[in-house]
């Protein structure tokens, strides 16, 4: 196991949800039991989940925060923790992969999980090991933890390598970032392709109580609301032109510190590279849900 040296981040600071601020090279972990044998962990990056079976435990996503995630998780369960799984390839879900003996991911995720993109440029000085063993999984595969099985659903849109994990025993779906926020979803492929993903998941809505996402926890009705809204777009209902709010470059705090929220991309780099909004996007609001999409990418291209 290789340790990550986070000392290059010493002059950056991270603010937690409670307002506390500490240096980015200091370990921070906060765990909350959300369901039987299921913990939600905050570090930096999106939420991490620890899922305990009868024989072993699995970590779902590994964040990009300082500290040995695997050692921290050992304080929560007495089950062996050897493996992790990535819901997708984005950097705020994958930095801690190197602490595990093996990582489950889709082939598309494996092909893309390499280095920080522009949203995480402040992390470029970190030496992130990428030589950990990878176990490629496909749609329909089962990850068996002993008395607790997680079924793989390959559902690319937010990222090419996205997958969700369905835990029928505990009626949970681990969704990564694919469903967006509770209020809106931004489609990155076509509306038709994303609607197929949601329709597949909707077939299992009676098996799901809660959906544990990278940034949010939802009840299963988000699938119903999104399906209704997507159908409005597909049948040609009129939508509004969508202009994203103009990003405002954050300033250092009163003490001159460059402070990053724990669970969002680094704004100092993200806003520098934000592309101007051309007005090509549309927003459909229906059934207490909003879908943002490109007006010329509603239907799949026909060959």
Image: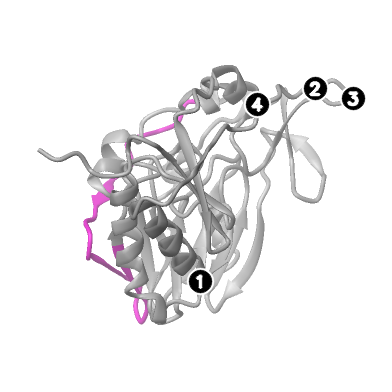
Residue 179: % across, % down: 46, 55
96 or 247: nearer the viewer: 247
Q: Which mark is first along the chain, 3 or 1?
A: 1
Q: CA distance from mark 3 to mark 4?
A: 23 Å
Q: CA distance from mark 2 to mark 1?
A: 40 Å
Q: CA distance from mark 4 to mark 2?
A: 19 Å
Drawn side of residue 117 relative to residue 262, left or right: left
Task: Reply above or below: 182 against 281.
Answer: below
Q: CA distance from mark 1 to mark 3?
A: 42 Å
Residue 75: % across, % down: 60, 64
Colour scheme of this structure image?
one colour
Q: CA distance from mark 3 to mark 2?
A: 7 Å
Mark 1 is surrounded, within 10 Å at the Cα level, by few (under 14), some (14 to 19) or many (20 or more) other residues, namely some
Task: Reply above or below: 231 against 224.
Answer: above
Residue annotated with mark 4 = 246
Q: Residue at x 38, y 46 (%)?
A: 88
Q: Pick the quarter of the image with the N terminus.
A: top left
Q: Which mark is first along the chain, 1 or 2?
A: 1
Residue 281: % across, % down: 46, 34
Q: Magenta residues?
A: 126-152
Whether residue 123 is in magenta: the answer is: no
144 or 74: nearer the viewer: 144
Mark 4 is surrounded, within 10 Å at the Cα level, by few (under 14), some (14 to 19) or many (20 or more) other residues, namely few
Residue annotated with mark 3 = 254
Drawn side of residue 249 relative to residue 280, left or right: right
Residue 28 in sight in this render: yes
Residue annotated with mark 2 = 252
Q: Residue at x 54, y 51 (%)?
A: 184
The secondary element bearing badge 1 is classed as: helix
Q: CA distance from mark 4 to mark 1?
A: 31 Å
């Amino acid at each position: 196991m290789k340790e990550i040296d986070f000392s290059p981040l010493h002059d950056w600071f991270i603010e937690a949800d409670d307002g506390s601020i500490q240096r980015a090279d200091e370990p921070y972990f906060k765990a909350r039991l959300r369901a039987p044998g299921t913990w939600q962990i905050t570090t930096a990056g999106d939420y991490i989940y620890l899922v305990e079976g009868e024989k072993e435990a699995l970590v779902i996503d590994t964040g990009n925060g300082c500290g040995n995630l695997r050692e921290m998780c050992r304080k929560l369960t007495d089950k062996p923790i050897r493996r992790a799984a990535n819901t997708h390839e984005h950097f705020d879900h994958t930095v801690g992969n190197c602490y595990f003996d093996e990582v489950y991911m889709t082939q598309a995720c494996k092909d893309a999980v390499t280095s920080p993109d522009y949203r995480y440029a402040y992390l470029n000085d970190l030496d992130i090991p990428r030589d950990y063993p990878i176990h490629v999984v496909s749609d329909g595969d089962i990850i068996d933890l002993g008395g607790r099985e997680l079924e793989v659903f390959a559902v690319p849109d937010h990222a090419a390598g996205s997958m969700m994990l369905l835990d029928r025993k505990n009626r949970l779906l681990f969704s990564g970032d694919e469903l967006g926020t509770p209020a809106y979803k931004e489609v990155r492929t076509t509306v038709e392709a994303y609607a197929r993903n949601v329709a597949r998941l909707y077939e299992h809505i009676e098996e799901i109580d809660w959906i544990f996402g990278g940034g949010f926890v939802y009840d299963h009705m988000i699938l119903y609301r999104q399906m209704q809204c997507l159908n409005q777009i597909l049948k040609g209902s009129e939508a509004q032109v969508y202009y994203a709010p103009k990003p405002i470059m954050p300033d250092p705090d009163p003490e001159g510190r460059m402070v990053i929220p724990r669970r969002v991309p680094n704004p100092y780099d993200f806003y520098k590279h934000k592309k101007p909004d051309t007005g090509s996007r549309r927003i459909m609001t229906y059934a207490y849900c909003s879908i943002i999409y490109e007006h010329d990418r509603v239907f799949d291209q026909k060959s």
